[in-house]
Image (cartoon, rainbow, N blue to C red):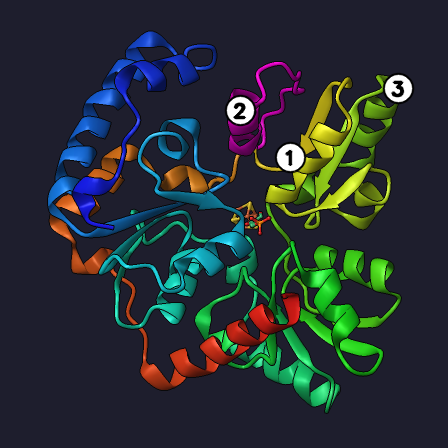
Amino acid sequence: MSPSAKKYISQHEFTEKLKNIREPEFIRKSWEIIEKIHSIREKKDFLIMAHNYMPPEIFYSVADVTGDSFELAKKAMNTPESSILFAGVHFMAETAKILNPEKRVFVPDMTASCSLADGISIPEVLRLKNEHPGVPVLSYVNSPASVKALSDVIVTSANAVKIVEKMPGDEVILIPDKYLAANVQKKTGKKVYVSRASCVVHELFTEVDTEMAERQNLLVLSHLECRPGVAQKTAFSGSTSQFRKVIEENPDREILLMTEYSMVENLSIDLPHRKFRKHPLFCPHMQKVTLEKILYALENEPVENEIFMEEPLRKKAEAALLKMMELSA
Ligand code: 13P
Ligand code: SF4
C-alpha cells in the first residue's frame, strides 16, 4: 500500500476514545505529535506495528497493525513497506527483522527490553542441551535472537501448549520463563525442563488476588506467564489476544485481567459496556515507548534505533520461527 493510501484516525475519533481515561491537556498534546507522525508517514514507506501493551495514545493512533507477539510475527512477514517501526520491546523488533531481512527495522527505544529475554543466556541454553541430549529446545518468543538461533522451535503464549503437544516424545526444554513452562507442563502432561527467568509484571499477581476475585465474583483471565498457582485458579490462561474472545463469551461479569495494564485500558476502550477492575501493573519496558520517541525515530531513522543482525545467526533464528508457523497452523 502506498503511504498516502493509508487512512489515519481523526482528532475527533482519537479524543472520543481517550476522553474517559486521559486528561484533555494530555489528549491535546498527544494529538499534536500524532499529526506530525501522520504527516511524516505520508512521505515515508513505513509500517508501524504495535503490541497490545502499548498505551492507548499509541495503540489507537499511529499503529497500522496491532496484536500479540504471535500475530505481529505473522503480520511482519511479507509486508509491502520497505521499513518497519516496532512500537514494542526489543525482542519483538528483532523478531520482525529476522523475518524481514531486506527491510530496515527500528525500535523507538533500544533499552526497552524484557526480563525474560534478559534472563536467558547462551551458556544456559548449552547447559540445558548438554544435560538433556536429544530433547527438543523450544524458546519462548521473549528471548534474544542468539537464543532463538540455538532453538528447534519458537513458541508464543498463543501456541505454546499446541506446539509442545505436537513435539515427538514426552520431554521438551522450554526456556526462559519458568512459570510459563510450569503452566505448559500442567496443561500438556509432558516433562518440561525449564530455566529460571520470570516476567517482572506477571509474577506480581498472587493467590491473594485470585481469592479476592473469587469472593467478589470477578471473571479472572491470566496470562500464561503468571505463576501456576494463580493461573490454575483463573477462568482462562493464555495470550493477550485470546482474552477478548473469553470476555465476549462471558457477557455480564466484571473482569480482572491479570496482565499488563495498558492492555486493560485498550480493551476497556474497545468494550465500553464492560467493567474492568483497575490494577497498577505496567511493564516498565513497554512504558519506555512514547509518541515522542516514535516521532523521533521516524524523522531521523537513527542508526542507534535500528536492528542489525549477522546473517548466519538470523537464518538459524528464522528457521526456528518458521517451524513455529508450520506447527501452529
Ligand atoms: P503475548 O504473546 O501474549 O502478546 O505476550 C507477550 C508478552 O510480553 C507478555 O508479557
Ligand atoms: Fe517482558 Fe513481562 Fe514486559 Fe512482557 S510484560 S515484555 S514478558 S517484562
Determine if residue 237 is in view. Answer: yes
Relative to residue 126, is residue 235 drawn left or right?
right
- Residue assigned mark 3: 215
- The foreground one among 198 and 192 is 192
The amino acid at mark 1 is: Arg
Crowding around mark 2 (Cα neighbors within 10 Å: few <14, some 14 to 19, many 20+) is: few
Total marks shown come to 3
**The label number, if any, that marks residue 270 in the structure image:** 2
**In the structure shown, which secondary structural element does the residue marked by tag 2 occupy?**
helix
The magenta stretch spans which residues?
Answer: 261-281
Q: Secondary structure at mark 3?
A: helix
Q: Amino acid at mark 2?
A: Asp
Disc 2/disc 3 C-alpha distance (Å): 27 Å
At which x and y percent is residue 27? 31, 16
Q: Nearer the viewer, residue 123 or 40?
A: 40
Residue at image mark 1: 244
Q: Height in image: 208 above or below 148?
A: above
Which residue occupies the foreground of this view, 270 or 104? Answer: 270
Q: Earlier in the sequence, mark 1 or mark 2?
A: 1
Q: Mark 2 or mark 3, which has the lower sequence index? A: 3
Magenta region includes residue 260 = no
Q: Position of residue 98 (x, y in %)?
A: 39, 70
* In this rendering, position of residue 29 left or right of residue 211: left
The residue positioned 19% from the left and 22% from the top of the image is 32
* Residue plotted at (69% across, 62% down): 160
- Left or right: where 136 falls relative to 188: left
Nearer-the-camera pick, 17 or 209: 17
- Is tag 1's residue or tag 3's residue first in the polypeptide sequence? 3
Q: Identify the amino acid type marked 3.
A: Arg
